[in-house]
Amino acid sequence: MPARQTLPDRPAPPAGQPARSAGWAPRRRAGARARPLPAPALAVAALASLLLSAPGVALGWPPAPGAPSARRAGAAPDAAPAPVIPAGAGEILRKPPRFTQGLFFAGDLLYESSGLYGESRLTVWRRAGGGLEPEAGLCLSPRIFAEGAALAAGEVFVLTWRENAVLRFGADLSPRGALFVPGQGWGLAWDGETLWRSDGTSRLHPHDPAGFAPKGPPLEVSDAGKAPGPLNELEYDPRTGLVLANVYMTDRVAAIDLETGLVRFWLDLSALARPLRMELHSPELVLNGLAVDGGGRLYATGKMWDRMFEILYALPEGVGSRDPPAAPAPGPPPAFDEGLRAGCPGMPSP
Ligand SMILES: [Ca+2]
């Protein structure tokens, strides 16, 4: 396994930009207006055109008039904190490990976006025996740092960290261009109507998959009036209707109500994550990667983790389990190009 002891989660920002202390973004009080984002439209257009070699790169910008700046406030400060649920797990091996950023199921296939400049990939895994093996893989431009990913309206969306772009692919990994993102990309989840994006704050941003246009103001997430910290990888759980978010540099997953922004409960995965970090000799290689399969089972992994966990937990009192909406009948598995099956064209095999 490659040594990653000194690898930061993300490289330092360019000169002139403030560094994030220990990777934590400053917290904002509930209801505060979002910091205005720079609008380097021309630079973004030039950059996005470089992200993919495929023709027809489409940019969904500028944002629609009335771009969001605020949303529902979170819990009152005197509200009771959300309960913390310990989680056990079954274990699934997967090799080779990746610098996991995004994870989701499409039928029996598991899609994973992984980051770092020069190493960003989109990998499709299939179950084999008691583990996971690569089914297909695509290398992304060395100019981008891939982040969270989700399947929405039949397309794979892959965020980039600070390249102001989301990349679109078919389920067979065929490139379909890029769209403008008005801010940083960390995690991404699809609830059946809306793509939710995290950006390293305690906010979630709603987007329409068509053009990735903002669908409203960001949602302030809070637990008893407190911001949970940088929300990272996301996953919608149809069993509860909540979005799960792992909080950067912690072993905790917040279960978030998308109507109120309240954390309904926390999953404590420290019993799983702590041994992995010790094994990897790095506090940086944290939990990052959540996916719910068609049967409603939650899976989690982390950066350069060589295994994935099936998370077992009981819903806390007051959080109802409901029948997930009927999933559309699975179509035939995507036909991956032979080159994609070979691994990662243009880059050394892992
Ligand atoms: Ca996910």
Image (cartoon, rainbow, N blue to C red):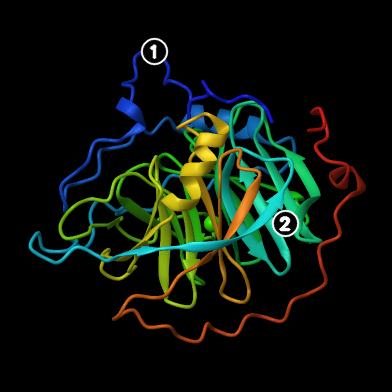
Depth check: 159 or 127 in front? 127
Q: Which of marks 1 and 2 precedes in the sequence?
A: 1
The percent coordinates of residue 140 (x first, y second) are 69, 36
Q: Is residue 145 visible?
A: no
Q: Which mark is residue 15?
A: 1
The amino acid at mark 2 is Gly
Amino acid type indicated by mark 1: Ala
The quarter of the rendering in which ligand 1 is drawn is: bottom right
- CB of mark 2 near ligand 1 (< 8 Å): no
Residue 295, position in %: x, y? 61, 77
Say if mark 2 contacts mark 1, CB within 8 Å: no
Q: Residue at x 77, y 50 (%)?
A: 174
Determine whether 176 is above or below 215 in the image. Answer: above
Element at label 2: loop
Q: Residue 155, relative to residue 35: is it above or below?
A: below
Residue furthest right as drawn: 338
Q: Identify the secondary structure beneath mark 1.
A: loop
**Mark 1 crowd level (few <14, some 14–19, many ≥20, 10 Å Cα):** few
Answer whether residue 297 is visible to the viewer in this image. yes
Picture quadrant of residue 299: bottom right
Question: What residue is at 38 percent from the left and 34 percent from the top?
Answer: 39
- Horizontal arrangement in the rendering, residue 23 relative to residue 208 (left or right): left
Please say if 342 is above or below 264: above
Give the image location of residue 236, x and y in percent: 48, 66
Percent x, y of residue 157: 60, 53
Measured in 3D between alpha carbons, the distance from the residue under mark 2 to the one under mark 1, in whole angstroms, is 37 Å
Residue occupying image coordinates x 64% and y 33%: 51
Q: Please give the label number shown on residue 170.
A: 2
Whether residue 272 sits left or right of residue 172 in the image: it is: left
- Where, by quadrant of the figure, is residue 75 drawn? bottom left
Viewer-nearest residue: 38 or 8 = 8
